[in-house]
Image: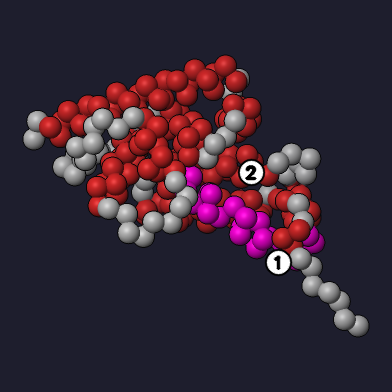
Amino acid sequence: MYTMATDFTKLSDGELLDRSAAGEEGAFQEIVSRYKNGLYAFLRNFLNRTDLIDDVFQETFLQLFTSRDSFDRERPLRPWLYTIAANKAKDALRKMQRTATVSIGTMSDSNEMSFDDMLNVLTSEEERPYDNLEKGEIAANVRGVIADIPDNLREILVMAYFNHFSYKQMSDVLRIPIGTVKSRLHTAVGRFAKDWKAAVRSKKTQ
């Protein structure tokens, strides 16, 4: 008897998790397909370390797979997935006991760029294979500055500006009050602006 193949793209995240738990491999593959690009971008901006990104990316989906039965199907999957990713990323950084350094030597002279302008360089999802070198250097150095920001400020900056999380979503993911989210984000933006200006000044004195 012929059985029509399931179109997993039409199922909700919760339904996909149920199908995956029931042994349908295609269901979990669809979840990976839905979230892989956004999650990879999140980790790239959070970690700024190519050697860590791939491992944490794989560990995140592995954790999602092994703990899928405990997920509350009434809640959205994305915040839960990013909570796993953020925790895995912080664990990886702690293991590395990494002290990031910013490469100032290639810092662009575009020190008049606004904070939003610099974020736009990093967050644009449009494919631009022929981007000019200067813009690439700006993006690389902005990521370098972000990498030097303390973990608690970096994660909220990445969630807010790179992944467009709402205050409520960030509150749920980080398990902190919304008031703390707003305060911490304000601090993170201020820290970034201060460090960026310092990096540009350093470049000018060279």
| Above-or-below relation of 61 to 177 | below
Instruction: Find residue 157 and report its image quarter.
Output: top left
For the residue carrying disc 2, how many other residues have a C-alpha within 10 Å: few (<14), some (14-19), or many (20+)? some
The answer to whether residue 95 of the structure is visible from this angle is no
Q: Residue furthest bottom?
A: 1
Report whether 135 appears left or right of 168. left
Residue at the image point whose x is 74% and y is 62% from the top: 8
Q: Amino acid at mark 1?
A: Glu
Q: Position of residue 173 (x, y in %)?
A: 60, 33
Residue annotated with mark 2 = 78
Query: Closer to the camera, 124 or 199?
Result: 124
Instruction: Find residue 54 and report its image quarter.
Output: bottom left
Residue at the image point whose x is 76% and y is 58% from the top: 10
Secondary element type, mark 2: helix
Q: Residue furthest right?
A: 1
Q: Main secondary structure of the magenta part?
A: helix
Query: Closer to the camera, 65 or 106?
Result: 106
Residue annotated with mark 1 = 25
Q: Position of residue 73 (x, y in %)?
A: 78, 44
Q: Position of residue 61 (x, y in %)?
A: 59, 54
Disc nearest the viewer among 2 and 1: 2
For the residue carrying disc 1, how many other residues have a C-alpha within 10 Å: few (<14), some (14-19), or many (20+)? few
Which span is picked out in magenta? Answer: 19-42
Please tell me whether residue 126 belongs to the stretch shown in magenta: no
Secondary element type, mark 1: helix
